[in-house]
Image (cartoon, grey):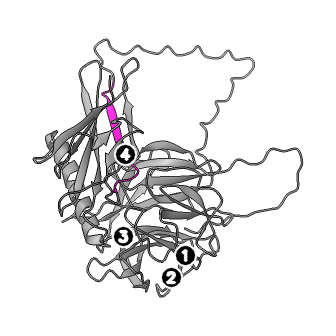
Amino acid sequence: MRRLALYIPVLCFGLPAPALADFIAVEQFGQGTVVRINESTGERQVIGLTGIGGVQNLARDPSGVLYTLGPELPGTQRSLYTIDAVTGVATELVPLSGPLRLSAALAFSADTGLLYAVARDAVTLVHTLFTIDPRTGVTAAVGPLGLRGLLTFNVTALDFSPEGILYGHTGSPTGTLYPGPGLFTVDTTTGEATVVTSIGLPPLWVQTIAFAPDGTLWAAGLVFAKMDRNTGQVIGPELSTLRFMSGMAFLDEAPPPPPEEEPPPADEAPPPPAEEEPPPADEAPPPPAVTCSISSPLLWPPNDRLAPVGFSAGVSVPPGVDATPLIQVFADDDAQVGDAVDVAPETLRLRAVRQGHAGRVYLIVAWVTDALDRSAFEVCSVAVPHNRSGRAIRRVLARAAAIETYYRAAQEAPPGFALIGEGPDR
């Protein structure tokens, strides 16, 4: 995403420094939470949910429109969406002319007015650069990137520098396995990639990158930090632990404040304040709602130790109602009580172990009930793959997603799953 900005150096004294702008980011797993990230502190502020689940990418054009690719579902045509920066809601824009399977990176070019995406072939594992016309959804292949790695990796990030150079970054599905070559640049006329990372291994946690207008490169994934565009290494502190951010873009201004009403003329009395009509006596408050998210959806290595998974749950209930959700943990693979401890948001720990070749799936359910006995729930999952191969990881993640879908439809755990933990204590 190339952004045009004019900078005029001015010397001034005694004036406060301008406020740093924020980034907007999306989560790959769960319901697709959209957040603002403070550039100076790394703190995250939830904006809302996409409404289409977790997404893998985010791109911003110079006018501020945010784009993402919809979920890749079997038997359906993938579509291009826009995301509202104020509410986080995704709106379908246009279906794509091509499948773009396993696409996990997206960037907007101010020079061509096109979106650029990288897709990986599921059979050959070759990464190819594509263009997408955001008006029509027509996709066109530019050429293969030519990246090589010791193990399977994904291209998880793309963004244009202010000078118009397309950068990308590779990553692993978990942020803990081999991430590939790391930072690279792309020739947008041929698709050929040139690796930048030249000192040591690239950071393991990077899932997305974004440039600020001043040319500073930022990286996010499980944490948020600056990156040296010349070496591909992190510079400065890792500012915070995030919830597995998978797409990020720079917001060069905050949402505009509401317009101020003009005062009435001096000789005209102001109108009396309008009386608010009380709600009808039989009007019920809005129903409760709950969210569920995990920052570490995969546990590795299987060392039989209890590990935090970054579980969080948010609830929305009327005032005066207990907002503490009930958390239940189910698991297959002959899991036992004791494999899930400290069952509560922010403290949940799960045992990194698996018995069978299919791996283990932990299903986490968050329930909330209001005073009218109306309930709401949401689910998320954590998996332990059988081994570190890309096939084993894809297999266990697909099984975890299917188990989440089963629970949402049946409101019960599938056969073979046992309740191994419940909390917090009330």
Separation (CA) of disc 1 from disc 3: 16 Å
Q: Is residue 61 visible?
A: no
Q: Amino acid at mark 3?
A: Ser
Badge nearest the viewer, 4 or 2 = 4
Q: Which residues are magenta?
A: 286-299
Query: Which residue, given by chain and number where applicable, does mark 4 sit on?
Result: 293
Q: Which mark is residue 176?
A: none
**In the image, 2: left or right of 396?**
right
Q: Are marks 2 and 3 in contact (CB under 8 Å)?
A: no
Q: Amino acid at mark 2?
A: Thr
Q: Is residue 137 visible?
A: yes
Separation (CA) of disc 1 from disc 2: 7 Å
Residue 14 lies in quadrant? top right
Q: Position of residue 386 (x, y in %)?
A: 24, 64
Q: Residue at x 37, y 64 (%)?
A: 173
**Element under label 4?**
strand
Query: Which residue, given by chain and number where applicable, does mark 2 sit on?
Result: 188
Query: Which residue, given by chain and number where applicable, does mark 1 sit on?
Result: 166
